[in-house]
Amino acid sequence: MIKFDKNNKVFTLDTVKTTYAIGLMDEGVLVHLYWGKKLKNPINAEWKKDFIWRSHSPFDYGDYSTNVLPLEFSAYGGGDSRLPSFSALYDDGSRVSKYRFKGYEIVNGKPEISGLPSTYAEKGDRVQTLIINLFDELKNVDIYLNYSVFEDLDAITRNVKIVNGGNTFKLHTVLSATTDFFGTDDMDIIHLDGAWARERYVTRQRIVKGNQNIKSQIGVSSSYHNPFIAVCDKNTTENSGDAYGFNLVYSGNFTAGAELNPYGTLRAYIGINPNEFEWVLESGKSFETPEAILVYSPEGLSGMSRIFHRLIRTRLARGKWRDKERYALINNWEATYFDFNEDKIVEIAKKAKEIGVDTMVLDDGWFGRRTGETRGLGDWVEMPERLPNGLKGLADRVNALGMRFGLWFEPEMVNPDSELFETHPDWIIHTKGRTPSKIRDQYTLDLSRDEVCEYIVNAVGSVLEKANIEYVKWDMNRQMSEVGSAGLPSENQGEVMHRYMLGLYRVLDTLTKKFPNVLFEACASGGARYDGGILHYMPQVWASDDTDAVERILIQYGTSFVYPYSSMGAHVSACPNHQNKRTTPFEMRCQVAIAGQFGFELDLNKCSGEELEIAKKAVEDYRRLGEIFHKGDLYRLRSPFETQMAVNEFISEDKKKVLVCIYPHSMTTAGHDEYIKLAGLEENANYELNGKIYGGDYLMNKGIYFINDSLYKTRILELNKC
Ligand code: GLA
């Protein structure tokens, strides 16, 4: 687990398969020594000699070479030319910090991060935390670097706490993790970029000298970039080679990237975006950063993903729904948009019930003046024209069908045309003197203010108490602009976006604890807030508004780099697809959606008999196989970004069942046949596939024969270990 070797001055953080090591230099500076496969032998004192030329180089600024050493933590002002882990503006106008080692502590378990979502340890888990205390003597400020080691899950989490014992000052940069790698001229960076309806596409590029950065500055983790990067060897593939993943458990502005300096040291970093952040840290007060999850796998990118999946699914997500089988649901959005009433919803539910769907989710349009997109957000009371018997009347009728009832909210928003805005025009995010921009005709409520958070808790809470609502789709459909708060003095305006997140997390914490039986699903114009922060409170996210099966293959593939299939809301919708007008076979739509949290986004009354049969079988298959997709081990075998198809293999927890999802998204005219090599099987075991027996070694070294002979003909193969 965690050890400090006093003689050699080395901290080692061991998991079952990995080691992360930090060296303490005589000057009290922490250097990053090692991260990789588990070391069997201790690192001896020789490590210090390795750094001699670096620490006495001509570029020496002060008493050590901050510019060239692989630092574990770098405060601005000591000559390091790379992005710092920390920077501040002190009351005397200076920006220079100098932190030196003061002490350390190793504790069992994992302390909570106050007000922020984070991973946690459960009783019996082998989890320890190393807290390293650094100190700036001149400014009387303590910094605590926290490292929690999840031994059996092979993951490390990091965050930073600053305690100000000196005069009030302004924090500018406080990253959650910076990790410096050595000798790294040949590495790649991978990130997930996108836009609305094209979320989390995999981008891989060579790391060149300089800073390669991704970020969000619009108040939401966003569909543009996910708060995740991986750095890996240029030869790393899905199933072999070193892969290092960094994921931020945060839903707001972030920065992440890799900076390669002229001396070949690579700094990977992740944390709150310093460009949109300032925090007045009063004397005697403390500040904690969000948590970063760090994962190393020698088993390639799929290996990295499997570690993320297990940690996020079992020790970041929480609550009753974490481990439970969830629902096959139907949502009326694409079936009706705003054109519905109680009877219409019941008709949709009835048909869905016939094929085994067990939850009816009523989407946008049930409240206030919400006749269309431009009105009503903020007023969470039923609209009598659509729901003459209120939510209770509808929920009771849905329950009487033997189905659960779920409801859509967009609690963080308000339309100018609403009672809420007319009563509280200053409750929106805005900057004095500037016209606030409308996006989708709405403003963002100012969750940095307690009274706004309280309003949301009460408004949503009282609706949930009114009727038997067992599922909530929590939407959020705009990014922030003209950021400012009427609730804060001018010197604190730089805090608004982080305070918003703290407010949001307080609201989510309160509501999810008050309504523990409700399954919450997050949504943000589809998947624009798909991050670990949200997944702490809500175990699933509507992955994208794009329900086209072809594009979903790509979106879900990219999403699986970090997030488990158990977290991906995935529905079958009508064709031609409403987003891109493409027509795909009904079976393909079912087979692509089934691996996620499965459901329908159409009116099944309009489907043919044949389509209904396929849908019914899909619901049955989902019940039978869902656990393997959600809790099994994922091996990605073909990338849809590089080939004509995605191939995803899932191995059940007990290793007895293997599912191979083959998703061709295009086809060359001549067709294409090949062997698809499986991974992660037992070499000496036999596996049955369609009545034939194959050896595990054969399947991994030769593979399954597959011919892509018909456009969009997807398959889900089931193999059973004999
Ligand atoms: C967003 C969501 C959709 C739907 C609409 C309703 O776009 O992503 O799924 O709920 O809002 O307005």
Image (spheres, grey):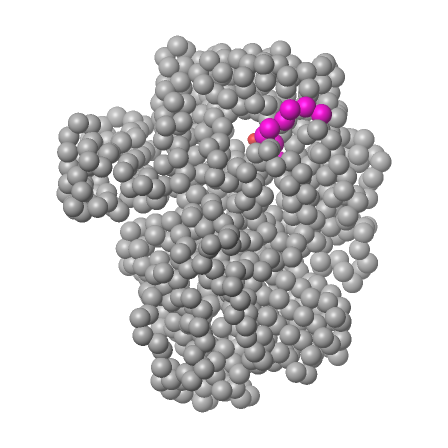
Q: Quadrant of ligand 1?
A: top right
Residue depicted at 42% across the width and 30% down the height: 593
Query: Of residues 296 and 549, which is closer to you in this image?
Result: 296
Residue 497 placement (x, y as % from top left): 68, 53
Q: Quadrant of residue 507?
A: top right
Residue depicted at 48% across the width and 35% down the height: 324
Query: Of residues 254 and 393, which is closer to you in this image?
Result: 393
Q: Going by the picture, which residue comes out furthest to the right?
A: 423
The image quadrant where one finds the N terminus is bottom left
Left or right of 372 in this view: 655: left
Left or right of 680 in this view: 293: right
The image quadrant where one finds the C terminus is top left
Question: Eyeballing the image, is 135 above or below 677?
Answer: below
Left or right of 236 in this view: 83: right
Residue depicted at 67% across the width and 38% down the height: 514
Q: Is residue 474 highlighted in magenta? A: yes
Residue 474 placement (x, y as % from top left): 61, 35
Question: Eyeballing the image, is 565 above or below 273?
Answer: above
Residue 251 placement (x, y as % from top left): 59, 49
The stretch of residues the image draws in magenta is 466-475
Whether residue 57 appears in this view of the structure is yes
Question: Eyeballing the image, is 234 above or below 80?
Answer: above
Left or right of 22 in this view: 534: right
Q: Going by the picture, which residue comes out furthest to the front?
A: 124
Whether residue 256 appears in this view of the structure is no
Residue 79 placement (x, y as % from top left): 55, 80
